[in-house]
C-alpha cells in the first residue's frame, strides 16, 4: 500500500504532462541545465554583455546577435553547454524540427526555436521568475492557447518546469496577477525583457 501511494502522485503528474507536451517539458529542463551551467561559468545568463566573453573563449563563428531567443540560445551551443539544436524545439505555429546542423549558416536557424527567452535574471532573482517559455505570441506578452491545450509551459529560475493555464485574453494569471505584468512581484525591480523566437 505504501508503494502504491508513493507511485500514484507520480503517475498523475506524468499523465497531466502527456496532455500538454512532454517533449517540450524535457526540452525546457535541458535548456535550464544549459542556462545554469552557463551562469555558473560566466557569472550571468546569456545576454548582450556575454557575447564578447563567449567569442573570446570559444572562438565561435556562430551569429551571436541580440534580437531573438535564437541569438541568445546560440551562445549555449557556442560554448558547448549543449551540442543539440533539438532541445530548443517546441511545437508552436511557425516552428520546424531542427536539423542539428551547427555551423555558422544553419545553427538555430529561423523556425528551429520555439521558446521565448526572458533576459535579466540573476541567481539572486525570485526563484519563480521565468527564464524560458512557450507558446508566447511573438512581439507580445500573451500566450497562444492552441498548441498545448490552453496551457503555457514555463521554465523558472528554480529549474522547475510548470504548466499554467492561459486565460481568454492570452494571459497566464498567478495569484490574481498576470505573469508577465512588470508589476508582478516575481520581477522585482527588473521588468521582463523578452526575446521571442525567430519564426
Image (cartoon, grey):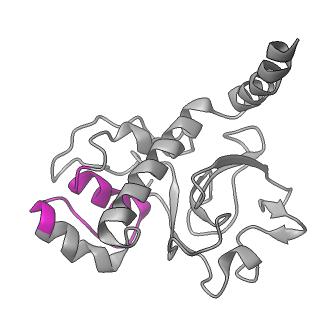
Q: Position of residue 184 (x, y in %)?
A: 76, 77
Which residues fall within the magenta stretch? 57-80
| Total marks placed | 0
Relative to 112, is 41 on the left or the right? left
**View extreme (front): residue:** 2
Q: Quadrant of the N terminus?
A: top right
Give above or below for 27 relative to 70: above
Residue 74: name its quadrant.
bottom left
Confirm whether the magenta stretch covers residue 134: no
Q: Residue at x 74, y 67 (%)?
A: 179
Give above or below for 127 relative to 159: below
Residue 102: name its quadrant.
top left
Q: Position of residue 192 (x, y in %)?
A: 60, 76
Give above or below for 67 relative to 74: below
Q: Residue at x 83, y 14 (%)?
A: 4
Relative to 9, is 14 on the left or the right? left
Relative to 136, is 123 on the left or the right? left
Residue 16: name its quadrant.
top right
Confirm whether the magenta stretch covers residue 78: yes
Q: Residue at x 21, y 63 (%)?
A: 63
Give above or below for 82 relative to 2: below
Q: Position of residue 53 (x, y in %)?
A: 20, 73
Q: Nearer the viewer, residue 70 or 16?
A: 16
Relative to 194, is 108 on the left or the right? left
Q: Nearer the viewer, residue 151 or 77?
A: 77
Q: Position of residue 153 (x, y in %)?
A: 66, 48
**View extreme (left): residue:** 59
Amino acid at each position: 500500500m505504501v508503494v502504491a501511494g508513493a507511485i500514484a502522485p507520480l503517475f498523475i503528474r506524468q499523465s497531466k504532462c502527456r496532455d500538454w507536451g512532454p517533449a517540450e517539458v524535457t526540452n525546457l529542463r535541458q535548456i535550464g541545465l544549459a542556462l545554469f551551467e552557463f551562469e555558473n561559468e560566466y557569472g550571468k545568463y546569456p545576454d548582450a554583455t556575454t557575447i564578447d566573453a563567449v567569442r573570446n573563449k570559444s572562438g565561435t563563428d556562430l551569429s551571436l546577435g541580440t534580437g531573438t531567443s535564437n541569438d541568445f540560445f546560440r551562445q549555449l551551443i557556442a560554448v558547448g553547454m549543449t551540442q543539440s539544436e533539438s532541445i530548443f524545439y517546441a511545437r508552436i505555429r511557425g516552428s520546424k524540427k531542427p536539423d542539428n546542423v551547427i555551423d555558422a549558416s544553419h545553427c538555430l536557424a529561423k523556425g528551429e526555436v520555439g521558446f521565448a527567452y526572458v533576459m535579466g535574471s540573476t541567481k539572486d532573482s525570485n526563484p519563480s521568475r521565468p527564464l524560458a517559455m512557450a507558446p508566447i505570441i511573438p512581439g507580445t506578452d500573451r500566450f497562444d492557447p492552441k498548441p498545448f491545450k490552453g496551457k503555457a509551459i514555463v521554465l523558472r529560475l528554480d529549474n522547475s518546469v510548470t504548466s499554467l493555464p492561459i486565460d481568454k485574453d492570452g494571459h497566464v494569471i498567478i495569484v490574481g496577477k498576470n505573469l508577465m505584468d512588470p508589476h508582478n512581484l516575481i520581477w522585482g525591480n527588473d521588468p521582463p525583457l523578452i526575446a521571442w523566437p525567430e519564426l
